[in-house]
Amino acid sequence: MTYKPPVRDHAFLLGEVLEIDRYTDLPGFGDASMDLVSQILEEAGRFSAEVLAPLNAVGDKQGCTWKPDNTVTTPDGFKEAYKALVDGGWTALGVEQGFGGQGLPHVVNLAFSEMSSSANMAFSMYPGLTHGAYSAIRNGGSDDQKALYLPKLASGQWCGTMNLTEPHCGTDLGLLRTKAVPQGDGSYRISGQKIWISGGEHDMAENIVHLVLARIEGAPAGTRGISLFIVPKFIPDAEGRPGTRNSVFCAGLEEKMGIHGNATCVIQHEESLGWLVGEENRGLALMFVMMNEARIGVGLQGVAQAEAAYQSAAAFAKDRLQGRSLTGPKNPDGPADPIIVHPDIRRMLMDSRATIEGGRAFLFWTALQGDLAHASPDEAVRQKADDYMGLMTPVVKGFLTDRGFKVCSDSLQVHGGSGFTEHFPASQYVRDCRITLIYEGANGIQALDLVGRKLAANGGRAVMSFFAEVDAYVEANQKDADLKPFLDGLAEAKAQLQDATMWLMQNGLANPDNAGAASSDYMHLFGLTALAYMWALMAKAAQGKIAAGDADPFYAAKLAVGRYYVERMLPDTGAHLAKLKTGAASLMALPAEAF
Ligand SMILES: Cc1cc2nc3c(=O)[nH]c(=O)nc-3n(C[C@H](O)[C@H](O)[C@H](O)COP(=O)(O)OP(=O)(O)OC[C@H]3O[C@@H](n4cnc5c(N)ncnc54)[C@H](O)[C@@H]3O)c2cc1C
């Protein structure tokens, strides 16, 4: 089964739903005409399908290999594919021109990221983290650090990592122990062990730039005493080339459930030489630039794995002959009908498709907010977009990965027993996708971030903006009778979300366990509502084309999937609202020793 890049869907979102041609006042958008973007999407699809996808199963079966000299070898073909990625300029697509990038909008870059992640998630994590390291240094680094590191990270010549986790410290970074000792010349010696560091060591790039959280001797305990350091594997020489080998080593690789082609490393800092990024004790805030970007990237992985898994399930369902259609044979000349005739198989395929297409729209819409927040000349637009980025990031990460994994699991189910065997790719998608619910802050933590921090930020300004935007959209389109089912569904979901938000305000403060108990249902209610908005936007664009006489079946299919979403998936908002309103009582009723 070959991965088919959803180029048409990407072009529809960028050109017809988000209409990126409108934003010529933003840097990069002026150069990104839809003609050019369409060509980029075609090329991105070709690269992903032809270069990366064939290595997906290879990476899964071979995994990475660690040797006692602390080197790591990536699976066969990864090194050559990485060179092709760099030579093709793919790592530099969304990077500013000043640092060697092509300066295209982030939202366009995201389309490539989705395709490469569908084709080969383990591989695409290497450039993904590199871009995150780029953004952290871009945001907090000195001019010298930017000049030294950014062009190399932008081109992909050097790779980046994020070093946060330690054996005793995962979610709770305040427990972090890795120590940094100032050397008096602006450099620091870093000592400690980091675990589960993605891409921490490999053979694909000439240097690896670790971004490391550590505590400077004497710094306050907890999160207020954490600083961020650049620790390069090879210390750049006077010409900026990889020089002396730094004392940062990969002490081993994790055996893990999925993403075998990505090296998950134990990283030992043995008085490694590092340089402070930004101010002392302000490291966590800077690292959040990288983490927030990575969280959007992980939400994207949820959609990307779902897309790849769905494609294999749809192909299987059209091919596998079992049973007869309840309404009479559809393949009378064959021994049985293809399983796609069965409503229960359709349920799984339609759930999947509505989740993927709505989720992708939500991702792209959010990425566009990132572009607006970054570069809009209008202060009010920048502020609103920045508010949205803060509010939506935990929803994108938590909701889209929970739902993406469900799609992968349903896609395996469509395969029956074949899905559980390794003859089909279905099981790899389930295994690879599973980590997306855990890393970059487990989904429970995303839900807590949403209800605990993001809702309340700036007096609830972000969520109020969202409610107002949805209300205005529903109001403005009332006269459009064809859109009515979408608008009604959206208005009801939004009313329930608003109700849940009020409930949280009234009950969460009085008893914080109520907020914790409600958080996951609230995140799902939010995600379902956001997707209802996306489906309304997509339905409007599709209906506009049909009304103008466009007979492309793409538009009719879009409306059919959208109607399915509104009728059969959106009603789950009611269950989430009812559950969250029960509060913490029954959930916390048993004492810990009863478990
Ligand atoms: C394959 C892989 C790759 C990774 N890559 C990287 C990387 O590149 N860099 C890096 O630094 N780290 C990386 N990690 C680490 C990853 O980010 C952590 O696993 C994650 O942050 C969760 O931490 P933990 O595993 O220690 O879980 P814990 O913190 O022990 O949490 C366990 C469970 O308890 C819940 N929980 C914890 N605290 C709370 C709370 N206060 N309230 C409610 N629930 C709570 C969590 O949601 C989770 O379900 C990677 C991990 C894996 C497995």
Image (spheres, rainbow, N blue to C red):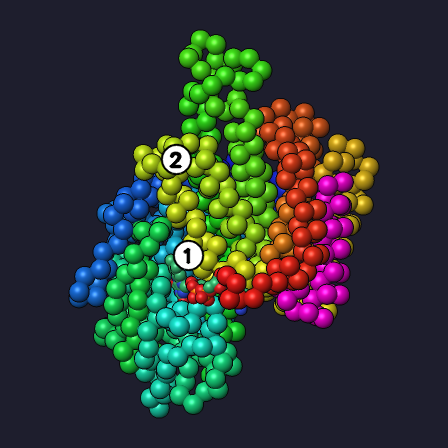
Q: How many labels sit on residues? A: 2
Residue 334 lies in quadrant = top left
* Relative height, residue 261 to residue 149 (above, below): above
Q: Position of residue 25 (x, y in %)?
A: 63, 55
Mark linked to residue 128: 1
Mark linked to residue 419: 2
Q: Nearer the viewer, residue 469 or 443?
A: 443
Labels 2 & 1 near each other (Cβ < 8 A): no
* Relative height, residue 94 to residue 456 (above, below): above
Label 2: state its secondary structure.
helix
Question: Which residue is depicted at the point 31% across and 34% down?
Answer: 423
Q: Position of residue 520 (x, y in %)?
A: 60, 56
Instruction: Mark 1 and ligand 1: say if the CB distance to the nearest ligand atom is below 8 Å.
Output: no
Q: Is residue 506 magenta?
A: yes
Horizontal relation, residue 513 to residue 100: left or right: right
Q: Position of residue 261 (x, y in %)?
A: 31, 51
Identity of the amino acid at label 1? Answer: Gly
Report the residue that reaches farthest toward the top.
333
Which one is closest to the eye, mark 2 or mark 1? 2
Circle 2 residues within 10 Å: few <14, some 14–19, many ≥20: many
Q: Nearer the viewer, residue 544 or 201?
A: 201
User: Which mark sits nearer the N-terminus, 2 or 1?
Assistant: 1
Question: Which residue is depicted at the point 33% across and 54% down?
Answer: 256
Q: Position of residue 506 (x, y in %)?
A: 75, 65
The region drawn magenta spans: 488-517
Q: Quadrant of the N terminus?
A: top left
Identity of the amino acid at label 2? Answer: Gly
Residue 91 lies in quadrant = bottom left
Quadrant of the picture in which ligand 1 is shown: bottom left
